[in-house]
Structures are given as structure tokens and as C-alpha cells.
Image: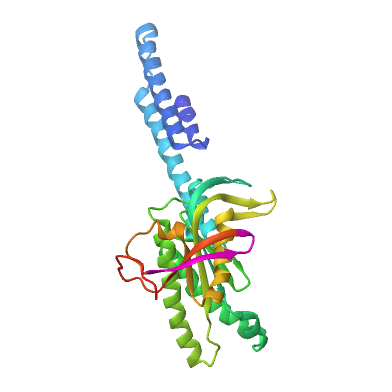
Amino acid sequence: WGLCLLAAGLVFFRLRLVAALAVVVALAVAVFAAGLYAIRVHQLLVPVAAVVFTLFAGFVTRAIVDGIESAVERGRLKRTFAGQVSPAVMNEMLDGSLAPGVSGHLAEVCVLFSDIRDFTTLSERMPPVVVTTVLQRYFDRMVQAVHRVNGTVICFMGDGLMACFGAPKKTADPCRDGVQCALDMMAELDKLNAEFEAERLPTLVIGIGINFGVVTVGNVGSTERHNFSTIGDPVNVAARLEGLTKELGRKILVTDAVVSRIGEGFNFDPLGSHSVKGHSPVSVWGIRTARPAPAATSE
């Protein structure tokens, strides 16, 4: 009974599943060897089967308890952070793949910036509560479009949105995902504007800039307050590109780096090289539809 009680004590030790199983197997072998020794040397019968059974019972019980606690904790974290991080970041947090604290690594990602044109002027003519409602409904549609293609919403900046594709988890074709997301956002905006028109709310017009490149991905900020983000020159270019949409009269602008990685499937329009603030000139392309096109053609 004493040996069985000691074996049952395994249930109180928190170990990783593999480590716990290794301990149980090692103890079972030790108990079996001790039983053989007791019989041969001291003619003493040790209840090996009962002790080994208790060891494995303790292991299974501990595993079940840990599984339940883990499921409860995952549910609690999802409820706590729902709406604060994108599903991709949440999954990395729950899996332990996202390093805690301030950290980062290099990754190739597609970055998307969107912004509502002249929203400051529009908001001046609307009560604050209406402005908040309009923005919430707008962001609801845009975020859904990002998440549908496994994108990650990085942050909101007033009426602007920044998203990336290919991080925190690498994807097969981040540029295609980014461009498809931009087209989906435009389609969702058309639906939303139809609702706004029926409700006598202002029509929204947005611009989107998309770029691809190597950036630093990870938790950015201070040790006390940080969040998942992407930093690097490709991010700045995407932001500048979004600002260029109004000047060029296009809703979506992409760079050469994006177009060269997609190939067929979208109809791009070459718009030449353009200067962007704080950067050397960038070759810019427009996009109109998602229909197949063997080659880009100008308007």
C-alpha cells in the first residue's frame, strides 16, 4: 500500500506530457527490476502489477487534468483577447510560437494600407456617435475581408487600417492574398455604401496601397507595453502608396515587388514610376478586376 501511495503521488507533479511518460516508464522498469530482485534474493513477493498500474493511472489522471486546465485557459485567453488581436496572432500565442516580450525576426510579407478619403471633412458634418457607428460598421467589413484570406490586422490609425499577409505564420502566396483582400474590401465597401445610401449616411471612398518586402515581424514597443507589428521600409512604401491613390485617381495601387510575384490572375495597369515622400521613385501599378489577364494593358 505504501508503494502504491507513492506511485499515486505522480498525479501531483506538473510535467510535460513526454517528460511525464518517460518518468512513468522509467519508474515502471525500476519497480519491475526491484520486484525480480526481491523474489530472487529475499524470496519476497512485491505487488509489481499494482504499483505499475497505479503509476500509469496517476499519469493518465494528471494528463486529463492538464488537458482540461489547458482547454479552460485557452478559452479564457480567447475571450480576453478577442477583438484585440487577429486570429493568426491569437493562434500563435496559444501555441506558444510567438515569443513573449519584445522580440522580432525577419520575414517576407505583403503589407496593405487603407484609408478613407476626406473622412475628417465628413466627420465634421456628423455627430460623434454617428461617426463612431460609421467607422465600426466600416471596419467590421474590412477586417472580415482581411481575415478571410488569413491576413493579420496590425493596427487601426484613426480611419486607416494596416494589415499584413505572410506573418506571423508564413503563407504560400502572401502577395496574391493581399491583392485579393484589397478587391474584397472594395466589394464589401460597395455593399456598405448601398446600406449607407438607404440610411442617408455619407458614401465612403477608400484608397489602398500594397507592397512586398522583408520586414521585422514580432512584438514591438516597450517591455511593459508592446504589440504585434511589422517594421521596415516596405511598410513605409505601402503607406506612401496609399496616399498616392488620390493623386493618381486609382483606388488600389501596388508595387513591382507585388506584381512580379503574382503572375496571371489579375489585370494590372502600369502607371509608371512615381516619387514618394522620403523614398526613391517607385514603379506603380493599378488594378481593376480579378479576371484572368495574360498580360498587363494600359487604359
Where 175 sits versus 218, above or below?
A: below
Residue for point 58% across, 46% down: 104
Residue for point 43% across, 44% down: 64
Which part of the image, by quadrant, shows the C terminus? bottom left
Where 133 sits versus 269, above or below?
A: below
Residue 144 location in percent, x, y? 46, 69
Residue 289 falls in which quadrant of the image?
Answer: bottom left
Q: Can the viewer see residue 250? A: yes
The part of the chain drawn in magenta is: 268-279
Residue 208 location in percent, x, y? 51, 70
Q: Is residue 202 left or right of residue 289?
A: right
- The residue most toward the top is 41
Residue 269 among magenta residues? yes
Dominant secondary structure of the magenta stretch?
strand
Residue 295 location in percent, x, y? 32, 65
Q: Along the line of sight, which residue is nearer the eye, 60 or 106?
A: 106
Q: Is residue 213 left or right of residue 118?
A: left
Q: Along the line of sight, which residue is nearer the eye, 236 or 195?
A: 236
Q: Along the line of sight, which residue is nearer the eye, 182 or 89?
A: 182
Residue 230 among magenta residues? no
Residue 222 location in percent, x, y? 69, 51
